[in-house]
Amino acid sequence: GAGVSQTPSNKVTEKGKYVELRCDPISGHTALYWYRQSLGQGPEFLIYFQGTGAADDSGLPNDRFFAVRPEGSVSTLKIQRTERGDSAVYLCASSFTAWTEAFFGQGTRLTVV
Amino acid sequence: KQEVTQIPAALSVPEGENLVLNCSFTDSAIYNLQWFRQDPGKGLTSLLLIQSSQREQTSGRLNASLDKSSGRSTLYIAASQPGDSATYLCASLHQAGTALIFGKGTTLSVSS
């Protein structure tokens, strides 16, 4: 596609529920990143994929968070047993390779009530 | 651990003024540094990417410089316009890292 696409743009869920956030990277980009941004803060790294594999998941806050990229393109970030503290904007980015310019999607605003 | 700091946190200027946004990073062993713009409620738009071997990059009214030895980068905006109002974020990619490390951003307001 022309840019990085994230769906949904907004998600409101109840505490304890499971959510999935989707990211469609730019076609041909092998590197894909998930970040989380809280109000007034810069994005914080969650996980990095090179192709299908998670090359670095050191930013995932706990085992309730999980992400997949089964075919090396679309990625899904999965959050189990959501907590109010998970409320944030989740940003996805892709780049041609790990060391090249990163392009971001519009983000998914997650609100846990 | 790489830390990125942006000063000032907020800046208000009248239209037409030239301005400089500052970014500092603690570890000079970076691979590249990228400047982004973020409008309220939106994602990040890439403005400029500077490789570690470069000193500056220019795009239109924007000029970004990099001084690895001092751990600093600046974004210069010439002849500011109200449409430049946004939050500007810098992020560094450390040589030993795999992802960009961001500052908290500078929120710029340009009044007409």
Image (cartoon, helix red, strand yellow):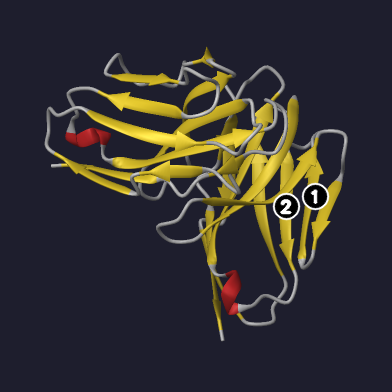
What is the residue that sits farthest to the bottom in this orientation? B112
- Give the quarter of the figure containing the C terminus of chain A: top left
Compared with A45, B73 (above or below) is below
Residue B65's label in the rendered image is 1
Is disc 2 surrounded by few (<14), some (14 to 19) or many (20+) residues within 10 Å? Answer: many
Instruction: Please tell me which residue lies in front, A64 or B112.
Output: A64
* Identity, as a three-letter code, of the amino acid under mark 2: Thr
The chain to which mark 2 is attached is B
Name the residue at 54% across, 43% down.
A4
Image quadrant containing the N terminus of chain A: top right
Relative to A10, B59 lies left or right: right
Q: Position of residue A77 (x, y in %)?
A: 37, 27
Residue located at (87% from left, 44% from top): B55
Judge whether A69 appears above or below A39 on screen. Answer: above
Percent across and percent down for residue B74 are: 73, 52
- Label 2 and label 1: CA atoms lie apart by 5 Å
Q: Residue at coordinates 55% horizontally, 21% vertically from top-left? A: A72
Front-most of residues A63 and B20? A63
Query: Can residue B68 be seen from the camera position used here?
Result: yes
Dot placed on the residue nearer the N-terminal end, 2 or 1: 1
Residue A16, quarter of the rendered image: top left
Q: Could you tell me if the residues under marks 2 and 1 are in contact, i.e. CB atoms within 8 Å?
A: yes
Residue A29: image quadrant is: top right
Q: Amino acid at mark 1?
A: Ser
- What percent of the width, then of the height, locates residue A106? 46, 50
Q: Nearer the viewer, residue B55 or A15?
A: A15
Q: Which residue is mark 2?
A: B74
